[in-house]
Image (cartoon, grey):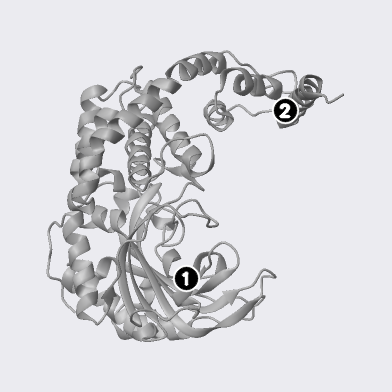
Amino acid sequence: MTSSNVSYLSSSEIVERYLAFFRSKGHIQLPDSPLAVAGGSTSFVIAGMQPLLPYLRGLVAPPSPRLTALQRCLRTDDAEAVGTNTGKNTAFHMLGNWSIGDYGKGEAISMALDLLLNVFGLDQSKLWVTVFAGDSELGLSADEEALQEWLRVGIPREHIILLGAEDNLWTMGGPGPCGPCSEIFFDRGPGFDPHPSVCRPGDGCERFLEIWNLVFMEYESLPSGSLTALPQRNIDTGMGLERIASVLQKAESVFSIDLFQPALSRLLELAPSGVMGDDSRETRARRMIVDHLRAVMLACLAGVLPGRDGSGSVVRRLLRRASRQARLLGIDKPFLGELLMPLAHGHGSLLTPDEHEQIPYLIRVVTDEEKLFERVLTTGLRYLSQLEPGTNGLIPGELLFKLHAEKGFPTDLATEILTERGLQIDWSGYEQASEEHRRVSRLSAETHFHKS
């Protein structure tokens, strides 16, 4: 296979080419499922395959045994890692193609390489893959079939890495469909990692960016941890749009692609570079702001507005984390609303015309929420800056609880700020103060509402 030497593709063009490729291979394109999940185990869709679970489990017949889609996802389980590396977003767009009991590993691997080389124009010599090495405790052997298929399509053996269940047995993090997987990595060169001699796919180093995961979904993981065979063998793939865009646009990170550039440019006007005196910390702050605001934008467009409970509290937390990063950049007034229009502009056709029309309303929502938090943030930051460890070397937990109970400052945000200062918290003191607060509240309620 040869490279078509594509020099640049916009995010919208990547989506169009991906979906068109799989439609040409007999896949039916599914509409984007709603980002917000009503009554589900998660507040938002966290993986591209989540809306397809009934098909993958054999519970419902799919419209076609071959499917493809672009799915919006939002995942906050490791939001603290956002901005610390070049490939992690809170919200992201997942491109996928699925076989529901139709084709197997060989065809999935062949189509994947065909797309990467002949549609996206990647250099095959820069591609590496990982393959499941087996797991004796689960009674699973190494995925020799996938290994042989990668060799068949021309990936050299030295570019195939065998990894264990922790890396290459894909699960939902609990009970549900699962199976061995092959992750495809792009080698961005030794300049992306300070220790290139010890860096390889699966190590978590910056040089090798995972761009696609091919999951060979064969099992159902039971609550006991054991595995049982699914009614049919499926193929479930996921390619992060932001990651493949960073490769095709030769961007330094997923935050430097076309989707974020207009918002980053506006942020640079509001807070010129060099304001913090720490390039890495400033880079992280800017990344977190545009990342979290994009997640807020997509959540709000899905009908989830900032609030105290449930999914609304997730949106509120993301906004407040972004507001705090702005203070580090020297912005001490509500400003996030000013980034929404550039952010929507950067997303172009990935947002519907109706969604673009909603942006002025979202600007008001975000600005009002920021104003609501402004005084709390100012007071809380001042309070936290004055906290010092007690005799045990820990920040007294009761002081942290007091900040939350009396000033409304989020405990998770306070924890993040103190951790950045290298401080630890006496959580036993926090729990004691919390329990005492509940006890006093119960006594007060009994006093006021005692029935004689």
Residue 119 in the image: state x and y as whole percent.
17, 70
Instruction: Name which residue type carries label 2.
Output: Ser
Give, as a three-letter code, the residue at label 1: Leu
Residue 434 marker: 2
Tell me: 125 left or right of 212. left
Where residue 81 appears, as percent x and y from the top left, is 46, 43
Residue located 66% across and 70% down the image: 225
Extreme-right residue of the structure: 452
Which residue is nearer to you in this view: 242 or 22? 22
The quadrant holding residue 373 is: top left
Tell me which residue sits at (41%, 38%) in the image: 305
Name the foreground residue: 447 vs 259. 447
Q: Quadrant of residue 158?
A: bottom left
Whether residue 278 is situated above or below residue 178 in the rendered picture: above
Label 2 to label 1, Cα distance in Å? 40 Å
Numbered tag placed on residue 53 in the rendering: 1
> Which residue is depicted at the point 53% across and 30% down?
413
Badge 2 marks a residue whose secondary structure is helix
Q: Considering the numbered disc 1 on the image, is that residue within a helix, a strand or a loop?
A: helix
